[in-house]
Image (cartoon, coloured by chain):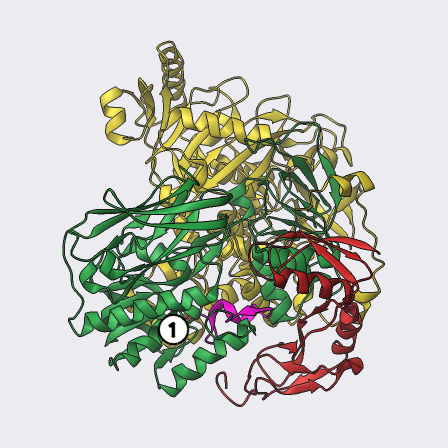
Amino acid sequence: MYDIAVIGAGIIGCSIARALSKYQLKIVLIEKESDVANGTTKANSAIIHAGYDAKPGTLKAKLNLLGNSAFDELCKILDVPFKRIGSMVIALQEDEFATLSKLYEQGVRNGVPGIKILQQKELRNIEPNISDHALGALYAPTCGIVGPWELAIALAENAADNGVEILLNTRVENIKKLENEYILYTNNRIISAKRVVNCAGLHADEINDMVATPSFQIMPRRGEYNIMDKSVGKLVNTVVFQCPSKLGKGVLIAPTVHGNLLIGPNSEDILEKNNFETTKDGLKHIFDTAARSVKKVSASTIITAFTGLRARCERDDFIIEEATDAVGFINVAGIESPGLTAAPAIADYVLDIIKGMNVDMVAKTDFVEKRRPVIRFNELTNDEKEKIIEKDSSYGKIICRCENITEGEIVDAIHRNVGARTLDSVKRRVRPGSGRCQGGFCSPRVMEILARELEIDMSKVVKDHPKSYILTAQTKDTSMFDLHAVNYLTKECVANANRI
Amino acid sequence: MGKRKIICIACPLGCHIEVSEDKSVSGYKVTGNQCKRGEKYGIKEMSNPTRLLTTTVKLRNSYLKRLPVRTNSPIPKGMISKCMREISKIEASAPIKTGTVLIKNILNTGVDIVSSRSISDLSQTDVV
Amino acid sequence: MQIEYDVVVIGAGPAGLAAAIEVKRNGVDSVLIVDRDRELGGILQQCIHNGFGLHLFKEELTGPEYAERFINELKELQIEYKLETMVIELTKDKVITMVNSKDGLLTVKAKAIVLAMGCRERTRGALNIPGTRPSGIYTAGTAQRFVNMEGYMVGKRVVILGSGDIGLIMARRLTLEGAEVLAVVELLPYSSGLTRNIVQCLEDFEIPLFLSHTITKIQGKYRLEGVWVSKVDDKRHPIEGTEVYIDCDTLLLSVGLIPENELSKGADIEIDTATNGPIVSESMETSTDGVFACGNVVHVHDLADYVTLEARRAGKSAAKYIKKLLQHKKDNIIISPGDGVRYIVPHHVNVDNLEDTLELFLRVNRAYMEKNLIVKLDDTILAVINKKRLVPGEVENIRIKSHMIRDREASFMTIEVQSEGV
């Protein structure tokens, strides 16, 4: 039996699991997807917010501030990319200055360090490409950008290094509460744990409802994004927001920690929790809005688009509490923005709740705080590059030409704890497929490496989900010729097809 | 089919020609062509269309998994599927030189399937 | 570790091979050619179809056969080469940093460089097609690699976006290997591929070609399940109400090639935004002295034979440069595209470097029938070339006798499309 079962391996679940791994407790982290960070954590703005836009007195405000200040240290120990570049909320009209003032006051109340209102000249000094219509901005120097899934993966890896058991492809289908334990029925095993922490993101309400009275509902809010090529990565130097609306912080334009440019998100309440489509109107909206903030935003530099779903709830604040009718069952739900920023603080907050449950939290003496450093070949000096290739010649074989990623890095990503098993999981750990060719050059090679290292046939390598097969069969497999040649197009369709 | 509209590929012009059966010596009438090559092409396409076939075969004893092969001259268009099935039955083994015959006189067409490249075996470090 | 060569050729595809051979044949022995793949030949090794060498060898060769001619010559000439070697940096001072497993990190100082890195394919991301992001979406070249070299099929029911040659070739290839190619969807009102490929890849297999259509949405949770195809208007915008859903599991994208010039940009080499390749002289020299470029890295070619001719010019010039025989001056004749012409390569000419012909390649900006190409030198009409058919998908090769340009002290040259009789 586990001491604590954590459901959901997004940034919150991974943060909590890692925090718990410092103690002599038997922890299991359960994730329904084929990799950690496969939900909202992999599709968000990647911003560490300064904290002026959270309502004072809320958990969001408190944990945003606490979380923000923890990032430098945390990312250093876990070797995760993080940059504190500052943010601007720009006023494009005179009357928006009132909003800026309001945010400023709110920021002061929340304890946000260093915020100030900038006038035109100061703004343009920092952001030369800002729109000609920008009149001023609220500047917050403590805002940062991070690799969100990199952080979740690093937390999970370190948690596993410290004894946490991580179960992927394991979906909780039902929970039964017994006297002093919870029985979790999953698709592939039955797990029993003394206590449960529910970090199931979009599905946190469904998990809660399995064992406690429904007390909140998670409503997905869709946000679409575009990533632009690294050649325009320096279009802005800070995270640039327009004035927020009722629907949220609005479309931002920001550098990513990898040197690309990110624009988005829009904000659309939808019904389905599994609708991850980008839409024509959504993409147009984010582009047009971003182009209003910054000059020279060009569609020709777009390299990809994606959609993320935020887990909204009516409370409009984080729900981090023990379920009233399920002792030992802690909900950590409704973690939308500033969830990523607050993650380290949320983990501490949850740990305090657990301590309050009279759980014996004895610190481990052999806790390994750091994870094994990640070699980023492209960031090494020439000398370091030479040395690493001498040590391991697989670092001399470059697989991803857009980002100069080596075979050594890919093999390492596969064999670490919580290692890569799919094409996308390689991409999220070491980046092949994220560049301008979007995997056109590297994917056959990455698949070859995965097949070799995992000792499976290349046709068994999937993109992400187990059903996302890539290759079908080997050529020269004669069963292919027995396919009944039926063309499903209607006769009208074919007739309308222009023959030249 | 007595009449067909096709695009001539004898030269980049790509004339749209019409070929119909008639009682002439060749058995066909060609219109829409701008030169004699078009007429020849049209008649051939109607009476005996042929194609060069290029594909791959399984390859053993090499870092390469498939060997590119070709017909050494055109085969009747109608034989393509049968030839593909026939070719899928064989396996080649490195080392191989360009032009090596892998299937002689495939399905009695008089045409051979030959290797389209040279490839060294695993004992060599690079291409032949 | 730093080593020196007179000439380094980056890329061992058709361009690099021909250039390196020409350098050696013109008396420069210190040549090194490098390639990131495990064998010489570049993209030709996966182009197993025929159609190569018609102009150069008067034979119809497959890609690998064509490559082998040059690979054999390279080896006979004992030109040094490195494989599985990636160039990661190129500086203005012609210092090349490259990486491989055997040598580790190498810094190579070259007196002259020939860029022959080829191009990459435009992606779905760059087209920003909305919908989900399932598996089963490939660029045509990547699918070609899987099928022809790894020996795997990429799907069973295929839709191809773009009627460029790579897409057409793959339509045939996948059909021959037993897949069902349901449609080729082309945005423009005409195909950008060679007519011969339309006939032998689509018509032969009764694969419908939807001109003036595009894909407006991609659907599929884990693996592709289908695409929505719409007709487009003359501004290439989808027409509402014309959407048709095609049930498929594979989407191939053949929507354009982009010259791969990240290394060139890193070395401050000037790029032409019309070609996305370096601005080059008649000798294929870029804006940096002693750095030459040829093949798809300069502009997207459609015939490997022309790539070879262009590469030979670059190689010959690189050798001349080493022997200090290449002339440099400030007031070259500037060549600019006129009406109807999208780009012309090379971009400027120093007549002192010409032998007996100036070789130009150009692409028009749309289809023209029965038009003249007017070649002008300053205000004088040098030549009027009647063309029955000009299409953007086919590169035109124009040859001008050097004596017509010499001793004229001209500043500009242009080529434009003009209708007959004007």
Colour given to chain C in the rendered image = green
Q: Where is residue C342 in the image (x, y as percent from the top left)?
A: 40, 44
Q: Position of residue A326 (x, y in %)?
A: 73, 34
Task: For the N terminus of chain A, give its image quadrant.
Answer: bottom right
Considering the numbered disc 1 on the image, is that residue within a helix, a strand or a loop? Answer: helix
Q: Which of A61 and C166 is in front in this view?
A: C166
Q: Name the residue under label 1.
A: C18
The magenta segment is: C35-53
Q: Where is residue C244 in the image (x, y as percent from the top left)?
A: 73, 37
Crowd band around label 1 with a 10 angstrom C-alpha radius: few (<14), some (14–19), many (20+): many
Q: In this view, does A96 lie above or below A462?
A: above
Instruction: Residue at 66% x, 77% y: name it.
Output: B73
Instruction: Residue at 47% x, 23% y: name it.
Output: A54
Q: Which chain is painted in yellow?
A: A
Query: In the image, is residue A461 part of the stretch drawn in magenta?
Result: no
Task: Give the left or right position of residue C107, taking residue C173 as reference.
Answer: left
Instruction: Residue at 58% x, 37% y: name it.
Output: A307
Query: In the image, is residue C41 part of the stretch drawn in magenta?
Result: yes
Chain identity of mark 1: C
Q: Is residue A465 visible?
A: no
Q: What residue type is labelled 1?
A: Ala
Q: Position of residue C157 (x, y in %)?
A: 74, 54
Q: Nearer the viewer, residue B109 or A145?
A: B109
Instruction: Residue at 48% x, 69% y: name it.
Output: C55
Q: Is residue C273 visible?
A: yes
Task: Give the left or right position of residue B9, taking residue C115 as reference.
Answer: right
Colour given to chain B in the rendered image = red
